[in-house]
Image (spheres, helix red, strand yellow):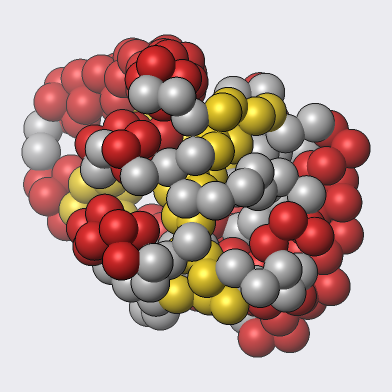
Amino acid sequence: YAGGEVPETNLGLMPCLVTSYEQGMKWKKAEIGRELTRILDSKGIVLLSWVWQSGSTASRGGPVVEPEDFKGLKVRGGSREMDMMLKAAGAAVSTIPSNELYAGMQTGAVDAAITSATSLISFKLEELSKNLTVGRQGSYWFMLEPLMMSKQVFDALPADQQKVLVQVGEEVETFGYEQARADDARISEIYGKAGVKVQEMSAATVNRWKEIARETAWKDFAERTKDGARLLKLAESV
């Protein structure tokens, strides 16, 4: 969501760049993680916890898994980059706010919604959905949801308090990943009990989406963002 002001942060919601929790967990210590940390530090932000969450897709109609499943559908993708990929697959994207998704699905203004399992549980879209694609085993959408702090405030603290914040931030990462995975399991159970058919994304399906993302969102990022091509290469190497 900070992408308008700090374009490099669009990597945190770039489709198909991170496709599993295991891959996301490696970013922190990888060169791409160090680069993002450095960039945010220069903008006055301290990253305390690295947490990723997978994206799931709720549909009021048929299953939406493969690229061709999205053709002609009105879909809320959640970011400019996701929208670019979805458009290339033939979808008509919607920019409806997430808190209006229930009404949008209810009226038919939106056919499918892509967001985190946690949000899809909170929005109670199982009441309107017929199919769910859950990102438990892999997804074309992983979102970086870090715990951040003002560098100005952090630097003004005594060294012992800074140490505690860093330590607790690292401990929170474990909790964050465990709960993200738990919500992926919970959404399958909640939607399944409501009669919604639940699908997973295979590695082959994710790779198909990755080719579309590479020619749309990734290409756009590399061309529009300073040093974007290098950052994408660092991310791909993880």
Q: Residue 33, image x and y in percent?
A: 58, 44
- Between 60 and 24, the residue placed more toward the observer is 60
Classify residue 14 as left or right of residue 205: left
Classify residue 47 as left or right of residue 163: right
- Between 208 and 188, the residue placed more toward the observer is 188
**What's the residue at 47%, 50% (across, down)?**
60
Q: Quadrant of the N terminus?
A: bottom left
On screen, residue 73 above or below 201: below
Mark count: 0
On screen, residue 25 above or below 129: above
Among all residues in the image, which is located at the extreme bottom? 224
- Between 139 and 148, the residue placed more toward the observer is 139
**What's the residue at 30%, 25% (across, down)?**
169
Q: Quadrant of the rendered structure where residue 99 is?
A: bottom left
**What's the residue at 87%, 51% (across, down)?**
208
Q: Quadrant of the rendered structure where residue 18 is?
A: top right
Residue 144: in sight, yes or no?
A: no
Q: Residue 3, image x and y in percent?
A: 44, 71
On screen, residue 231 above or below 46: below
Q: Quadrant of the C terminus?
A: top right
Q: Residue 64, image x and y in percent?
A: 65, 48
Q: Quadrant of the rendered structure where residue 83 is?
A: bottom right
Residue 224: in sight, yes or no?
A: yes
